[in-house]
Image (spheres, rainbow, N blue to C red):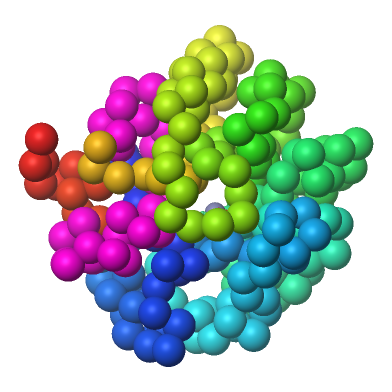
Amino acid sequence: MQFQIAPSILSADFANLGKDIEMLNASADIIHLDIMDGTFVPNISFGFPVVEAVSKIASIPMDAHFMVVHPERWVKRCAEIGVKMMSFHQEAAKEDTAAILADIRANGMKAGLVINPDIPVENLFPYIGQADFFLIMSVFAGFGGQKFIPDSLKRIKTLKAELKRRGNDAPIEVDGGVSDDNVQLLKDAGASIFVAGSSVFKADDPAEAIARLRGEKRTY
Ligand code: DX5
Ligand code: ZN
């Protein structure tokens, strides 16, 4: 199993973002962009001017996680900027979910479906085959630096088992409180893409923290 680390720039130094992106180009697999609208979640992060600026220096794929109402509005714009993975919340899209997944794919991006910790994981099952990846939130979307919710492990296992049963190899991404303390358990549960904000950017050596999460150097 190949594991990919997707640092969230929500915890980066926005006054020196270029430097952090260069570091990620050299050490990470994916750049995770957390887009919040202050309505779907009680916080506002950043929008397209920042995504565009990142796109100019990013040499690894950009993964845009939309925590917004009406994610369908932003599909074209993401594709134009060069975003490779676009995900949105099933609880924001509701009955439009299948159409938005299809639109993301039609625009040449990988389509990801996300759920918050209070949404039954079974809500994702109807979209197996329609999504290219699934994102299980292991904290409630809205803020970086929250504590990992251990029940997420069970939810990942349940989804992984259903994917296997249906012969689907869509990767499971996990987002929220991911650190050295839980990454191995998450790998064992079936996750393969790991979003990490504070555990990377608050580390003394972020590049080394990324390598450690990937499993190149174990400290435990
Ligand atoms: C939360 C975001 C996460 C967050 C992760 O709404 O989706 O991507 O930035 O940050 P940490 O790793 O600090 O929990
Ligand atoms: Zn995220």
Q: Nearer the viewer, residue 105 or 46?
A: 46
Q: Is residue 150 left or right of residue 121?
A: left
Q: Residue placed at 61% from the left, 49% from the top?
A: 141
Q: Is residue 115 left or right of residue 74?
A: left
- Residue 115: x and y, percent? 66, 37
Q: Is residue 104 left or right of residue 18?
A: right
Residue 22 part of the magenta-drawn span: no
- Residue 183: x and y, percent? 30, 37
Q: Nearer the viewer, residue 213 or 161?
A: 213
Q: Residue placed at 25% from the left, 47% from the top?
A: 213
Q: Nearer the viewer, residue 166 or 198?
A: 198
Residue 107 shows in this picture = no
Q: Quadrant of residue 125?
A: top right
Residue 185 part of the magenta-drawn span: yes
What segment is highlighted magenta in the picture?
182-209
Q: Quadrant of residue 207?
A: bottom left
Q: Residue placed at 58% from the left, 62% from the top?
A: 34
View extreme (top): residue: 165
- Residue 2: x and y, percent? 31, 39
Q: Quadrant of residue 190?
A: top left
- Residue 32: x and y, percent? 49, 61
Q: How many marks?
A: 0
Residue 144 vs 191, above or below: the answer is: below
Residue 27 vs 156, above or below: the answer is: below
Q: Residue placed at 42% from the left, 67% from the top?
A: 11
Q: Is residue 184 left or right of residue 89?
A: left
View extreme (right): residue: 95
Give the position of the N terminus as an image quadrant: top left
Give the position of the C terminus as an image quadrant: top left
Residue 53 shows in this picture = yes
Residue 57 vs 60, above or below: the answer is: below
